[in-house]
Image: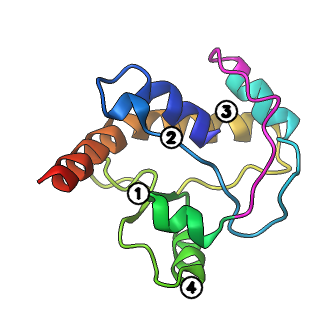
Amino acid sequence: MAAALLQHALRAEPEPLRSLKVVSAAVAGRGGAPVSENSVIALKKVGLDISGHRSRTLTQEMLDGALAVIGMTESHRAMIDLQGAPAPKNLFLFREFIPGPIDREIGDPFGGPLKAYEAARDEMVEAIPSLVAHLKTLIAGKRA
């Protein structure tokens, strides 16, 4: 869900943000699994279709080529840190850049009711403007 929401938001941005490729990968799990039905429904309600998505396992090649690596929870961040050789330097949480005292983690709704998926979706949507702003700073720093 996060990758589709972020990719959708980036399409509305000027270049080079518009051309950023957003890739979803599992830190623990097997590749090739279909997306959950509740993920499809939660995003269909906001006009996005992820029904053809299949999971991928995180690779070092993905880490090496990423402008930013974004996890949902501190445990994701720790697992990515341990998997990386070297660990990625631009490793963040999806909600890390929202100002103020808020919960920075987005819980995994897997196996839960549709309402849990919708809540996770809404937490992601809330974070996208601040995340996009941070990606802009990373791109500007890369150009400098």
Task: Please rate how many residues cluster around mark 2, counting C-alpha atoms within 10 Å: few if below 14, some from 14 to 19, many from 20.
Answer: few
Which circle's residue, 2 or 3, is located before the other in the chain?
A: 2
Q: Which residue is mark 1?
A: 68
Instruction: Tell me the magenta residue range.
Output: 44-57
Answer whether residue 89 is visible to the viewer in this image: yes
Q: Which residue is mark 3?
A: 118
Q: Residue at x 17, y 47 (%)?
A: 140
Q: Which residue is mark 4?
A: 82
Q: Which residue is mark 2?
A: 21
Say what secondary structure mark 1 lies in: loop
Image x and y of residue 46, in percent:
62, 17
Which quarter of the figure has residue 96? bottom left
Q: Residue at x 38, y 53 (%)?
A: 102
Q: Is residue 50 magenta?
A: yes
Task: Please rate how many residues cluster around mark 4, counting C-alpha atoms within 10 Å: few if below 14, some from 14 to 19, many from 20.
Answer: few
Near-viewer residue (80 or 45): 80
135 lies above or below 88: above
Which circle's residue, 2 or 1, is located before the other in the chain?
A: 2
Image x and y of residue 118, in percent:
67, 33
Callout 1 touching callout 4 (CB < 8 Å): no
Check disc 3 and give the amino acid type: Glu
Mark 4 or mark 2, which is nearer to you? 2
The residues tagged by marks 2 and 3 sit, at their Cα atoms, a distance apart of 24 Å
Q: Overall secondary structure of the magenta stretch?
A: loop
Which circle's residue, 1 or 4, is located before the other in the chain?
A: 1
The residues tagged by marks 3 and 1 sit, at their Cα atoms, a distance apart of 25 Å
The residues tagged by marks 4 and 3 sit, at their Cα atoms, a distance apart of 30 Å
Near-viewer residue (17 or 128): 17
Say what secondary structure mark 3 lies in: helix
The residues tagged by marks 2 and 1 sit, at their Cα atoms, a distance apart of 11 Å
35 lies above or below 106: above
